[in-house]
Image (tube, helix red, strand yellow):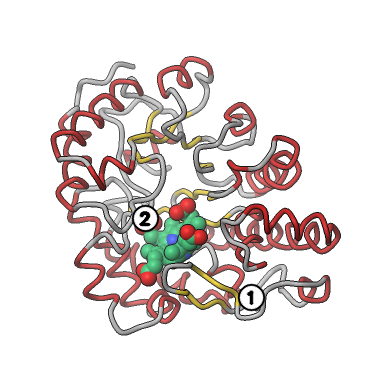
Amino acid sequence: MSSHLLIRAARGEVVERPPVWAMRQAGRWDPEFNRWRQGKSFYEFSEDVELAARASLSPRRFGVDAIILFYDITSLPVAMGLPFTLRPHVGPWPDQPIRSLDDVRRLSPRPEPTRFRHILDLLRRVKDELQEDLPVIVFAGAPFTVASYCLGTGKDLEETRRFAESQPQTWDALLHRLSEATVHFLNVLIREGADIYQLFDSWAGALRFDEYERWSASYHRRIFAEVAEVPRILFVKECPYLEVMCQSGADVVSLGTRHDLAAARREFPHLVFQGNVDQELLRCGTPEQVAEATRRCVQAGGGQRHIVNLNHGCDPGTRVENFEAFVRAVKECRGSGSV
Ligand code: 1CP
């Protein structure tokens, strides 16, 4: 059994202080990352094991309690046979967007591990470097969010909905296939030593309740039931359906700024919560404001069954001194938690 602080907290064990990490802790906001990132396309960069390992490990210098591997939620559909290109200021874009049932059937539902060899090599490389000092987080996008990238609709929910309504069979087949591949992908990574995983359904929080149940929550439940060997984290950006998230089978539920962390801890005492410092503050605030907000967050979490994080990922405007203040504030709360 792992003895890492973050893993113990995720299992609901008593900890000396809450652990801290951030979504997109490795990325465009970090000048060091930007220096290495130059001159290669996104997928070339993330498929270069040496560079991806350097990017994954770079937030270690800030004192975070976990390392998330550097790849993307679209890396899985790439392995399934759908190449992507990162369009500047747009995001990942499929070279040939899914349009028909035949397009879905061409995607491999259980891609051979050789198709995502670079991620397995990255995991090995990062684990060797860490020597068990920190746990490794792996992740996948949930079927709804990844499907919207496979269609080329991304965050544009109206467009995604139009496709789902005009081609329900293709849409369902795509969600099913992505879910099967996700279960396979995560189980391979866990077999190879990943310590914990997070399922990102970033854009599902904008769905109506009935859509959320059909397109999102039903797949969360299936994936969490079938990938259960390590702690499971669910992230949906600012999700209005907290109760449904709490019944997904996740061990850890990520909260947004719309949620009240202390109230969630009282209402769902068997769960662990992650979050929920406002990432906007890391972009626009001062280090003092960030430290103050982080201390309030630690207090609301009560020191136990809490992983300190942001409401969403660090965005490219995040200031380095604010990220440092965020991590430092958690570590200075050491010993102040109540059981
Ligand atoms: O050129 C670059 O470096 C572009 C930025 C970038 C980065 C840093 C992309 C393209 N992907 C990544 C890596 C990445 N993506 C990680 C590992 C790094 C870490 O967390 O420290 C992770 C966990 C992701 C996950 C991811 N990709 C999500 C879910 C998290 C979230 O932010 O909600 C999503 C939605 C994506 C899609 C994506 N990939 C890249 C971009 C710019 C986007 C967003 C596009 C959009 O806004 O629609």
- Quadrant the N terminus occupies: top left
- Residue depicted at x 80% and y 57%: 172
Against 219, is 42 above or below?
Answer: below
Q: Which residue is mark 1?
A: 112
Q: Is residue 281 depicted above or below 273 in this figure?
A: below
Question: How far across and down, in percent of the image, does residue 290 sit?
Answer: 21, 36
**In which quadrant of the rendered view does residue 249 lie?**
top right
Mark 1: which secondary structure? loop
Q: Residue at x 34, y 17 (%)?
A: 339
Q: Is residue 162 left or right of residue 88?
A: right
Answer above or below: position of 75 versus 160.
below
| Nearer-N-terminus badge (2/1) | 2
Residue in the picture at 13% in, 34% down: 288
In the visual, does 198 lie left or right of 249? left
Label of residue 24 in the image:
2
Inspect the image, locate mark 2, and give the three-letter code of the amino acid beneath it: Arg
Q: Is mark 2 within 8 Å of ligand 1?
A: yes
Other residues around mark 1 within 10 Å, as few (<14) / some (14–19) / many (≥20): some
Quick check: can you spot residue 192? no
C-alpha gap between disc 2 and disc 1: 27 Å
Q: Residues within 10 Å of mark 2 (few under 14, many from 20)?
A: some
